[in-house]
Amino acid sequence: MAVPRHKHTRSKVGKTRMHKNIKRVVLGVCPKCKKPVLSHTVCRNCGFYKGQEVINVLASLTKKEKKAREKEIKQAEAQQK
């Protein structure tokens, strides 16, 4: 049986164990815009959480970006129907 030549420090052992425990992030789908979003968080694309608007995403955009985003939202709603 092999014997370690030198003692491993706590940080070295911890770094090795940390990478063994990394798990894949599970994403859900936003019910309003159908974009991937973390569970229990506000959608960054449309600003909705649990069917209510929490963040006004369109307020911080320029005029050109606002038109494009509104167009995307309307297309997504049309596809739902």
Image (spheres, rainbow, N blue to C red):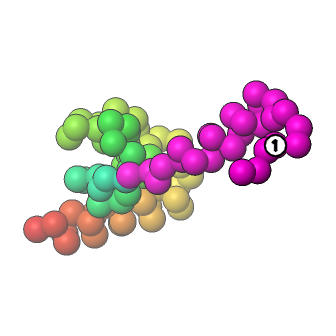
Q: Residue furthest front?
A: 1
Residue at (88, 38) in percent of width and height = 6
Residue at 37% across, 53% down? 27
Location of residue 50 by image quarter: top left
Quadrant, the C terminus: bottom left
Q: Nearer the viewer, residue 40 or 25?
A: 25
Q: Position of residue 23 (x, y in %)?
A: 48, 49
- Res 19 seen here: yes
Amino acid marked by disc 1:
Pro
How far from the left and from the top, in percent, is residue 60? 53, 42
Name which residue lies at 31% across and 53% down.
Answer: 28
Q: Position of residue 55 (x, y in %)?
A: 40, 35
**SS label for mark 1:** loop
- Residue 2 or 60: which is nearer the viewer? 2
Q: Which residue is mark 1?
A: 4
Magenta region includes residue 69: no
Start and end of the magenta stretch? 1-26
